[in-house]
Image: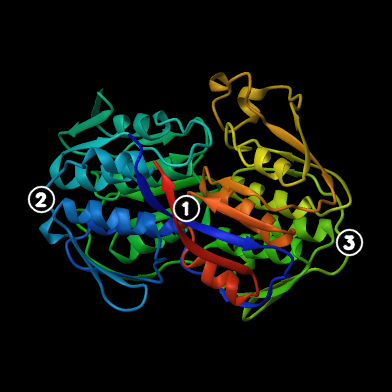
């Protein structure tokens, strides 16, 4: 028997260039991880510039379910008090919604010597091998078992080790850092992630009393300490949000300033903008992004930091859909991150899948080549320019949703986006900010038949 329920959707009417000024919020990919890191302390921590997004809300709920106190105390600020932490078991429903669950392993093992948590979910953009996280924990003296989707971890005491990641991993690096700060002895992580969000975590932990340093390129050294205190820390700006606004402004032939944008976090992106003939100016205020004439077709190959981020390539696709000629996007970090292509094609884009020939794919790609499926797409060719047409679409993951939204703004007609909660996992007040830049976008509550 069918029933009726309500759903929030975005309705976008295209054709208006983005113009004005917008402020980048706190980084999604740093925010909730620093919240979890605060559990390692013995005193209160205060985190500033936290984005008001669903991932932060969910992690706050998990922390409170474990006995910690999380208090909103001013604009985009949380006070985290770990003193009441009394449980090492995370409820099953939290694993299905996010990849955050494994990050709790370090704090829970340090405080209780055990942890029980659901295996993580999150965006459906290819497999994210957990062995990159778990093998390192085992080297630190952790015993791991899996049972019915639940990960059980136990240790008689975390011990320092030297561990080399077979494939570079952002979350895996953070997981082992969180485990190593209170471990006995020294831990050296080789082939570790270089992302600025990892450095933001390191800065916060060091302010709490940890002893972490980058010893060389992709090498992190952690001297275990006996305890950590609390600290006050301001979350870095979200570079993925900056790139989203930049691509939207240039694709719509607009002109915007993104306050707080940091050029040092965006080097690979700014290089490609220059190659494509897009305009940008770096100032004390942030970065101005603007359309300054016909865009040139530009190829991109995603890489781990400091290369062109995998999170940027769906957004970049919207921009080069407006470029003259053929642009190739080659995804080398994620196994399958072209789910947005079908929607852009329905909107009028000319996109063809490619299968690049590489000499040693297992070494070349940062995902596990052995896990590739015959229908996985590793590269696409975009032929532009494109006149995007509106339509009705469902959002399947965070960046693909933002990509469709930007295409709708830069195109013509009316677009309705369903399942917008996927977008709101990573963007705070997105429709409000875009509306302030001139976009014709509104949130509507509609009735749907279940």
Q: Residues within 10 Å of mark 2 (few under 14, many from 20)?
A: some
Q: Position of residue 78 (x, y in %)?
A: 29, 69
Residue at which label 2 appears: 86
Residue at which label 1 appears: 214
Q: Residues within 10 Å of mark 3 (few under 14, many from 20)?
A: some
Secondary structure under the numbered disc 3 in the rendered image? loop
Residue at which label 3 appears: 294
Secondary structure under the numbered disc 2 in the rendered image? loop
Foreground: disc 1 or disc 2: 2
Q: Quadrant of residue 84?
A: bottom left
Q: Say if 190 sits above or below 59 in the image.
A: above
At horizontal 77% and vertical 45% (from top left) the residue drawn is 348
**Which of 208/397 is in front?**
397
Q: Quadrant of the C terminus?
A: top left
Contact between labelled residues 3 and 2, with CB atoms less than 8 Å apart: no
In the rendered structure, the answer to whether residue 38 lies left or right of residue 236 reads: left
Q: Position of residue 197 (x, y in %)?
A: 48, 56
């Amino acid at each position: 028997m069918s029933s009726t329920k309500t759903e929030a959707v975005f309705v976008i009417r295209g054709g208006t260039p983005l113009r004005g000024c917008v402020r980048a919020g706190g980084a999604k990919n740093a925010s909730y991880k620093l919240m979890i890191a605060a559990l390692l302390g013995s005193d209160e921590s205060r985190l500033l510039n936290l984005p008001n997004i669903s991932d932060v809300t969910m992690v706050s709920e998990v922390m409170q379910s474990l006995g910690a106190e999380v208090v909103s105390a001013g604009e985009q600020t949380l006070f985290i008090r770990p003193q009441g932490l009394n449980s090492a078991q995370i409820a099953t429903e939290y694993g299905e919604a996010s990849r955050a669950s494994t990050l709790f392993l370090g704090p829970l093992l340090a405080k209780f010597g055990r942890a029980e948590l659901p295996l993580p979910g999150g965006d459906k953009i290819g497999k994210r091998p957990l062995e990159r996280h778990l093998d390192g924990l085992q080297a630190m003296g952790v015993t791991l078992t899996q049972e019915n989707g639940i990960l059980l971890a136990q240790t008689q005491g975390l011990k320092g080790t030297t561990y080399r990641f077979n494939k570079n991993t952002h979350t895996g690096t953070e997981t082992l850092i969180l485990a190593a700060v209170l471990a006995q002895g020294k831990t050296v992580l080789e082939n570790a992630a270089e992302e600025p969000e990892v450095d933001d975590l390191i800065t916060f932990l060091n302010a709490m009393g940890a002893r972490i340093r980058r010893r060389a390129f992709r090498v992190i050294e952690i001297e275990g300490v006996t305890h950590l205190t609390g600290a006050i820390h301001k979350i870095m700006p979200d570079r993925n949000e900056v790139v989203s606004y930049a691509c939207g402004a240039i694709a719509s032939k607009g002109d915007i300033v993104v306050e707080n944008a940091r050029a040092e976090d965006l080097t690979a992106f700014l290089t490609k903008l220059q190659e494509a003939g897009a305009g940008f100016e770096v100032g004390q205020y942030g970065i101005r992004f603007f359309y300054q004439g016909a865009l040139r077709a530009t190829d991109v190959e995603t890489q781990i930091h400091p290369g062109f981020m995998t999170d940027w390539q769906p957004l970049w696709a919207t921009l080069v859909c407006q470029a003259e000629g053929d642009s190739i996007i080659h995804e080398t970090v994620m196994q399958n991150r072209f789910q947005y292509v079908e929607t852009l094609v329905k909107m009028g884009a000319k996109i063809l899948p490619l299968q690049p020939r590489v000499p040693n794919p297992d070494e070349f790609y940062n995902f596990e080549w052995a896990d590739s499926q015959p229908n996985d797409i590793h590269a696409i060719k975009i032929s532009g320019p494109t006149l995007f047409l509106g339509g009705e679409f469902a959002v399947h993951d965070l960046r693909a949703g933002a990509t469709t939204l930007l295409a709708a703004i830069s195109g013509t007609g009316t677009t309705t986006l369903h399942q917008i909660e996927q977008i709101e996992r990573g963007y705070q007040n997105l429709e409000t900010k875009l509306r302030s830049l001139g976009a014709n976008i509104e949130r509507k509550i509609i009735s749907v038949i279940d």
